[in-house]
Image (cartoon, rainbow, N blue to C red):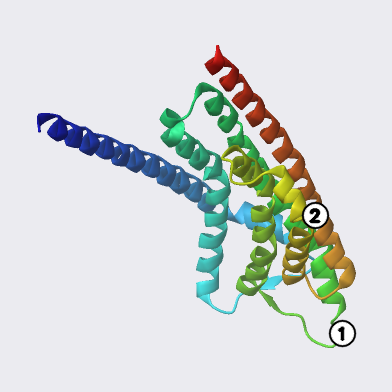
Amino acid sequence: MTDLKNSSQDIEMNMTDHLSELRKRIIYSLLSFVVFFIAGFIYIRDIYGFLEADIPIKLSVTSPGEVVWIYFTLASIIALIGSLPLLCLQLWLFIKPALTPKEKKASLAYIPAVFLLFVAGLGFGYTVFVQLILPFLLSLNEGMFNELFTVERYFRFVFRVTIPFAILFEIPIIVMFLTSLGIVTPEWLSKIRKYAYFVLIIIGTMITPPDFILQIVVAIPLILLYEVSIILSRMVYRKKLKAHREFMEDQEE
């Protein structure tokens, strides 16, 4: 009876410790988000000027609320980008006690990769929008209408194009992580390749105008990302099999 009581108390203490640790990690993540949000808010004019310099039109506002909206929206995007590495680090620190030394070293490398791929996705999506999508849409006008672009509508459209790219560029990291957990294998990824291509092409058509060339330009990088994911999955899978063989050999000895 005493052993059961002690076991119950240990479980409660472990649960309390985990919740306390989780709360600490969440607080640190929120603090980093707030710090970068404030920094984004302070330098909002420079950020807005940098983004507006890439477009051949002057944006307008139709209400005071749009000025407030662009301040908070751009500051939130900057905060998300800036705090992403710290958020990943806090997640890693939370699960660190449950990892082996090799897993700790391998998983730590995911943190800069997640950040770099996210930024690369945003950059690629923004370049595609400014260099291809926006000129294509403006060319459809041909003097038929007076062009009046409001800040809110313009940036909503920009984010609708760029943020999906930022998420899709995380595919290699997600695939590597799922492979390390044994959820997916390179053989399975190769087997569903044609279905994955179809889904990626559909996504490309959803975030680009109905122009065949633009859709191809967007779909090709996404398909290449999937192929890179398969290669990385093979690397992770080989290391996993090697570690398993070494473990079995040690057990036999």
Q: Is residue 180 left or right of residue 26?
A: right
Residue 89 versus residue 145 in the image, above or below: above
Please provide percent x and percent y for residue 92: 48, 35
Residue 240 position, x and y percent, is 63, 30
Q: Amino acid at mark 2?
A: Ile
Relative vertical location of residue 105 with respect to residue 182 in this rendering, above or below? above
Q: Residue at x 50, y 73 (%)?
A: 65
Asked whether residue 115 appears in the rendered view, the answer is no
Of circles 2 and 1, which is in front?
2
Query: In this figure, which residue is indicated by the disc labeled 2?
Result: 223
Q: Amino acid at mark 1?
A: Gly
Picture quadrant of residue 132 = bottom right
Where is residue 172 shown, x and y percent of the image?
69, 45
Circle 1 sits in a helix, a strand or a loop, which is it?
loop
Using the image as rendered, state which of residue 16 and residue 243 is in the foreground.
243
Residue drawn at 52 percent across, 67 percent down: 69
The mark total stands at: 2
Mark 1 surroundings: few (<14), some (14-19) or many (≥20) residues within 10 A? few
Image coords of residue 241 (percent x, y): 65, 29
- As drawn, the label of residue 143 is 1
In which quadrant is the N terminus drawn?
top left
Horizontal relation, residue 227 to residue 65: left or right:
right
The residue depicted at 54 percent of the width and 78 percent of the height is 63
- Residue 73, disc: none
